Amino acid sequence: MKKLREQMSPALAISLLALFVALGGGAYAAIGANTVGTAQLKNNAVKEAKIYKYSVTNTKLGTGAVTTSKIRNGQVTRPDIKAGAIGPEKIAIDAVTTEKLPNGAVTANKLASGIGRVVAYAEVKSDGTIAPANSSGIQNSDIGTYGTSIYCLSDLPDFNTMTVTPGIGLTEFDGIVSANADKAPFDEGLCGSFPEAQVAVITYYDDFFGSIAPVQSKKPFTIVLFE
């Protein structure tokens, strides 16, 4: 040891110290871009405790390096994902299944449509009341019945177009239900006692065997309003 100390110059000591630092705590700086691939990562190796904030950047990882098998279940939570980071091109086909979505996560305004975004919808019973489980944005107080089979809807959110689907009977002998819909302003008298009505729906009953002509009759229907 004495002989080694006598032969060690200050320059050699500094060189050895630099080598020690390079191989120790500062070694992460030597990782080049795209040098960490999936082969360098053990399965289930990526977990929250192993990732220091901003320590693993995009430039350090090769394309496809972090695969599903490299990430422990439950490690990537909502706060870890930037807004807009996961677009359609990032999601594999069939990756988002029903069990991945909590109840109420996908609402009507989250669904795209060829007509436009859904702003309100309701399943309306023959008595003019709604089925709450199948309705949103339209309440019982928004619907009034007038005449033989006219449903007048008011206090609706702003909308441009709509669809109305008549209800169906429980058996083939319950006849055929049809519906016509109109958007204000209406022909005079269509919604008589509901001058504030924005939509009028008229339902009809048609005998299944064609023995009688369609007649106005209170029947259920579903209405959907779009932007």
Image (cartoon, helix red, strand yellow):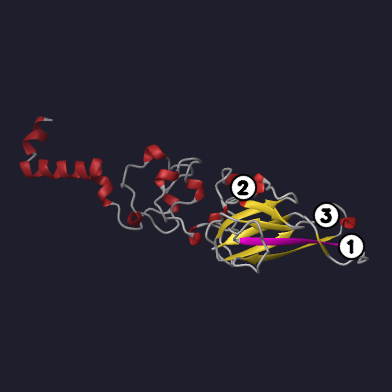
* Residue kind at label 1, given as amino acid type: Phe
Which structural element holds mark 1?
A: loop
Question: In this figure, which residue is indicated by the disc labeled 2?
Answer: 141
Q: Residue at x 25, y 43 (%)?
A: 23
Q: Residue at x 63, y 67 (%)?
A: 186
Q: Quadrant of the C terminus?
A: bottom right
Which structural element holds mark 3?
A: loop
In the image, residue 195 lies at what x, y percent? 60, 59
Q: Range of the magenta residues? A: 199-206
Q: Residue at x 48, y 51 (%)?
A: 67
Labels 2 and 1: the sequence-earlier one: 2
Q: Residue at x 55, y 47 (%)?
A: 105
Labels 1 and 3: the sequence-earlier one: 3
Against 189, residue 141 (above or below) is: above
Q: Quadrant of the N terminus?
A: top left
Question: In this figure, which residue is indicated by the disc labeled 3?
Answer: 169
* Badge 1: residue crowd in 10 Å (few <14, some 14–19, many ≥20): some
